[in-house]
């Protein structure tokens, strides 16, 4: 008789399949096989669906071992869960590591029973010190697991934590968390009943290493349960636990537990440039073929994105469009697409348009128009779902099917006809230089170190013209070799691309590249982070080779300041200011410090808003927002100025709201007026602050 | 069914412009599809989308440059286009309505459409008469300033059931027998956006250039009865006066001003 069939006094181990009998054991193995088969079939089905998806334009499986390793590190560290939310980070860490430990523990036991002793005929190693250590670790990690699940339950049901609840919250969410809880608690109950039951026939004092199970045994004893009653009840307790575990295994691919595989796969196949570099459309694609019309038009990675979503709601809670009351909830868009696909597969939904105006489509046109392409959702997503890429592709569908928003259409037509969003003639583009008492060099006629791409707003918008003149003064003051393109500059196309007008984007990109190439320059410097983004990350798709030598002006100016080219002592100004990270400079391209360095070099006190750096809150102008009118509860710009005046350390003593983006300037000048903040705060660009410091120095 | 849409490339003037002689200098002009025609094109394309086998033909009178504009109509869904041009037309300083109706009439004779959609007016010369004059020339029924059209009735019964906007906020519902010319008012629909990819794809659609000879119109027939005698920018005069005081005082002062200016009697 194999040793594991019987509990022998004096041998420290535990009886497996105690009181279950041969038939019961065979039944268990049979059910386990069935559960695993159901699991495998479900996983196969899911991945077969992805395999049917359209090709993804990005290479996502190259260097697979490194990808697997990076994804494993992300999962193991839970760093994305800790981001902005310590509680959720701890919760997920406890559950993940608890779950993995129990999985490993069960696997070790399986190896000992079925492989080591049964197949290889070796004496069991599940005894003595090994057993004691195993029991202790498993009990400790199991406790961690139960605590983690308890934290999840507390937050979901007791606190009713806002972002966890949404349109797509359903029974599967309840089932998932309660199943895990019952599995954890049920494991200890089984253990406690077994210890108590076996105490009738042997000395169980060594089982104190299973401290939680021992505690359960004590509680049962105190409640008057005798060892005999425990032994009698054991098969029932054991079978409930076993059946629940097997049912859980079988259900993994069919509901929320699948995120253990899909979210991991999503991290493995992620694209670190997603969002900041949008995919091209094939050159020969006709309007009908651009953007998703059917669910089949989504790429395999996008289908995986939909399945990777755990409904955590981090994207929606970070979304400025949602905060402002625009009809966009990024989580719902992703889950609406998933629900539509599953509905079609199950045959209980009719085929409709993916995106259209009129309310019958899966996603409404207004929802997509609301997106500011600020990437807050993608930054917040713990499983790297690429919302912005999908949203842009849906914008492309709207554009190609003629359903572009009217206000956007006006700006876009202006770019098509005049090369700028204002609809002003190109000969007026350099008019901003008229008020300067020096000539701005023409980069078309002389070779320069910095080719300065001024941009639409600094060229045509009165408020931003002041910023352009300030920057010109800084360049002059520092003796920089620079020049501009005068009439040959055109809209950079970054936002044209993000509202989905890819054809026009291609046109301006090609023409701008041609204009660059006709000049002799070393680097390109941009006033606008939007230009900086598209030149450095996207123009490469159209043959531009100098993406690495494109800079935002704050980066160039930071060097000038550090080199002492402006002769500042750092005592010139003494205001208190706060700095707003533009999405396209910060979150998109990771430049957080250069503008701060420049701001500090003027002598001002820099006070941070709570949402700073990668958590910056969009001004509302991105993704075409600048050209549209929305019915907003509180405009994002107003909310942000409120944050500057209320949530900073200096609070109302903050004198200036410093920006580094012309679009932000326009949005905040507007929000300052409509929000009634005109007397409270000034909007200043980094360069304007610098020019003031230079002037102060000269006095 | 065949739908003919007349479209015009109109000039738009920049904010600060200069006049030389009887013309605005070319530097200050931009060209665009006439706003009203944009709605006419949309209405035609919606007819084509609702019906089987509906052909939409866009027709314009204009120089080669205007192909850029007519291509917008093709990108929005017109099947092909006809562009009427001739040296004899180029020599005319300002085409009058009669001549336009003559030229477009010749195209109508050739194409034999069931329905012609034109814009109410063009936003450069604002004559607002071409549609009706064309109906008169070709002997079609007509309806002007149409702000609603029953697409199904056109397709199923061959009747244009329209709503027309009249003066004083009165609206008229009329059934017009086809063939007919309808002058389309803005707001009748929401014109679709023509994407750049769409415009590029429309390059492959046909634009048939017709000369006077092709249309069987004599050079004398295009002699315009209109001459531009002068062009000037009217002086804008404005005078603002702020009336101080509370509401009662302001009202009293306003009454004085109105009496003084003779707006109201003593």
Image (tube, rainbow, N blue to C red):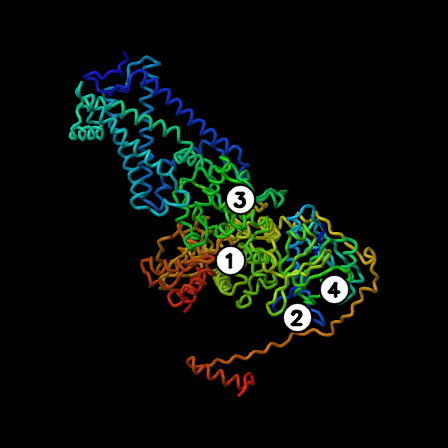
Q: Nearer the viewer, residue A647 or A259?
A: A259
Let me know if residue A344 appears in the view.
Answer: yes
Question: Cβ–Cβ below 8 Å for labels 2 and 3?
Answer: no
Residue drawn at x 74%, y 66% as measured from the top left: B97
Give the chain letter at badge 2: B
Q: Which residue is mark 3?
A: A354
Relative image position of residue B10 (x, y in whole percent)? 68, 62
Q: Which mark's residue is nearer the viewer, 4 or 1?
A: 4
Q: Which residue is mark 2?
A: B18
Q: Residues within 10 Å of mark 2 (few under 14, many from 20)?
A: some
Q: Are marks 1 and 3 on the same chain?
A: yes
Q: Are marks 2 and 1 on the same chain?
A: no
Q: Which residue is mark 1?
A: A628
Q: CA distance from mark 2 to mark 4?
A: 33 Å
Q: Secondary structure at mark 3?
A: loop
Q: Earlier in the sequence, mark 1 or mark 3?
A: 3
Q: Which residue is mark 4?
A: B133
Q: Secondary structure at mark 4?
A: helix
């Amino acid at each position: 008789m194999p040793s594991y069939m019987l509990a022998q006094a004096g041998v420290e181990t535990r009886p497996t399949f105690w009181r279950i009998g041969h038939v019961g054991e065979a039944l268990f193995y049979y059910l386990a096989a069935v559960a695993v088969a159901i699991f495998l079939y479900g996983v196969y089905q899911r991945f077969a669906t992805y395999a049917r998806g359209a090709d993804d334009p990005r290479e996502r499986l190259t260097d697979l071992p490194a990808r697997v390793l990076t994804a494993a590190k992300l999962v193991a560290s839970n760093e994305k869960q800790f981001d902005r939310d310590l509680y959720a980070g701890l919760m997920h860490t406890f559950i993940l590591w608890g779950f993995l430990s129990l999985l490993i523990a069960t696997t070790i036991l399986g190896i000992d029973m079925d492989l080591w002793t049964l197949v290889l005929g070796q004496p069991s190693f599940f005894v003595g010190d090994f057993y004691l250590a195993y029991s202790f670790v498993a009990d400790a990690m199991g406790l961690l697991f139960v605590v983690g699940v308890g934290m999840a339950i507390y937050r979901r049901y007791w606190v009713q934590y806002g972002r966890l609840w949404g349109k797509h919250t359903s029974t599967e969410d309840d089932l998932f968390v309660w199943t895990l809880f019952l599995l954890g608690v049920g494991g200890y109950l089984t253990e406690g009943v077994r210890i108590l039951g076996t105490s009738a026939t042997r000395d169980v004092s060594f089982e104190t290493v299973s401290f939680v199970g021992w505690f359960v045994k004590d509680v049962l004893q105190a409640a008057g349960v005798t060892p005999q009653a425990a032994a009698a009840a054991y098969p029932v307790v054991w079978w409930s636990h076993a059946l629940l575990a097997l049912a859980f295994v079988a259900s993994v691919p069919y509901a929320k537990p699948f995120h253990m595989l899909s979210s991991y796969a999503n991290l493995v196949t992620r694209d670190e440039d997603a969002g900041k570099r949008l995919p091209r459309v094939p050159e020969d694609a006709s309007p009908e073929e651009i953007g998703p019309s059917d669910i089949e038009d989504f790429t395999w990675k996008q289908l995986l994105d939909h399945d990777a979503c755990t409904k955590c709601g981090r994207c929606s809670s970070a979304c400025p469009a949602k905060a402002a009351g625009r009809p966009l909830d990024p989580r719902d868009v992703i889950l609406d697409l998933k629900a539509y696909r599953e509905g079609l597969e199950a045959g209980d939904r009719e085929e409709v348009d993916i995106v259209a105006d009129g309310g019958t489509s899966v996603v409404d046109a207004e929802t997509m128009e609301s997106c500011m392409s600020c990437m807050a959702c993608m930054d917040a997503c713990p499983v790297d779902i690429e919302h912005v890429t999908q949203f842009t592709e849906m914008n492309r569908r709207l554009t190609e099917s003629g359903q572009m928003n009217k206000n956007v259409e006006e700006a876009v037509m202006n770019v098509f006809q005049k090369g700028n969003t204002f609809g002003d003639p190109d000969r007026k583009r350099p008019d901003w230089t008229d008020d300067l008492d020096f000539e701005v060099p023409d980069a078309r006629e002389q070779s320069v170190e910095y080719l300065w791409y001024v941009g639409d707003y600094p060229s045509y918008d009165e408020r931003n013209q002041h910023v352009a003149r300030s920057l010109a003064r800084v360049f002059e003051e520092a003796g920089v070799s620079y020049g501009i393109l005068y009439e040959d500059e055109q809209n950079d196309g970054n936002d044209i691309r993000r509202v989905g007008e890819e054809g026009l984007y291609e046109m301006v990109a090609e023409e701008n590249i041609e204009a660059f190439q006709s000049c002799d320059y070393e680097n390109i410097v941009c006033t606008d982070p939007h230009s900086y983004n598209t030149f450095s990350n996207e123009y490469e798709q159209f043959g531009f080779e100098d993406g690495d030598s494109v800079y935002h002006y704050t980066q160039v100016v930071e060097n000038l300041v550090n080199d002492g080219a402006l002769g500042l002592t750092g005592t010139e100004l003494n205001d208190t200011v706060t700095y707003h990270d533009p999405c396209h400079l910060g979150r998109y391209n990771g430049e957080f410090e250069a503008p701060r360095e420049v701001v500090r070099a003027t002598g001002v006190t820099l006070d941070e808003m709570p949402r700073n750096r990668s958590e910056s809150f969009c001004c509302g102008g991105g993704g075409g927002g600048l050209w549209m009118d929305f019915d907003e509860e509180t405009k994002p710009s107003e909310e942000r100025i409120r944050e500057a005046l209320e949530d900073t350390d200096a609070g109302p003593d903050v004198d200036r709201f410093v920006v580094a983006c012309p679009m932000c300037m326009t949005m905040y000048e507007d929000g300052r007026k409509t929000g009634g903040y005109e007397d409270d705060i000034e909007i200043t660009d980094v360069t304007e602050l610098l020019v003031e410091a230079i002037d102060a120095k000269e006095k | 069914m065949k739908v003919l849409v007349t479209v015009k490339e109109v000039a738009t003037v920049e904010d600060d412009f200069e006049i030389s002689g009887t013309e605005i200098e070319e530097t200050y002009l931009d060209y665009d599809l006439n706003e009203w025609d944009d709605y006419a094109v949309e209405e035609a394309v919606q007819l084509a989308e609702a019906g089987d086998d509906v052909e939409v033909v866009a027709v314009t009178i204009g120089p080669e440059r205007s192909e850029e504009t007519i291509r917008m109509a093709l990108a929005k869904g017109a099947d092909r286009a006809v562009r009427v041009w001739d040296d004899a037309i180029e020599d005319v300083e300002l085409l009058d309505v009669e001549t336009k109706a003559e030229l477009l009439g010749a195209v109508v004779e050739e194409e034999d459409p069931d329905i012609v959609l034109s814009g109410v007016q063009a936003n450069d010369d604002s004559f607002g008469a071409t549609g009706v004059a064309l109906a008169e020339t070709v002997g079609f029924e007509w309806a002007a300033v149409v702000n609603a059209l029953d697409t199904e009735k056109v397709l199923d019964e061959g009747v244009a059931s329209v709503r027309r906007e009249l003066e004083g906020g009165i609206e008229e519902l009329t059934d017009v027998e086809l063939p007919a010319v309808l002058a389309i008012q803005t707001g009748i629909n929401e014109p679709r956006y023509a994407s750049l990819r769409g415009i590029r794809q429309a390059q492959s659609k046909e634009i048939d250039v017709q000369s006077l000879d092709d249309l069987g119109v004599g050079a004398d027939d295009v002699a315009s009865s209109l001459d531009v005698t002068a062009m000037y920018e009217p002086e804008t005069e404005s005078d603002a006066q702020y009336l101080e005081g509370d509401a009662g005082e302001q009202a009293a002062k306003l009454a004085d001003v109105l009496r003084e200016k003779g707006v109201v009697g003593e």
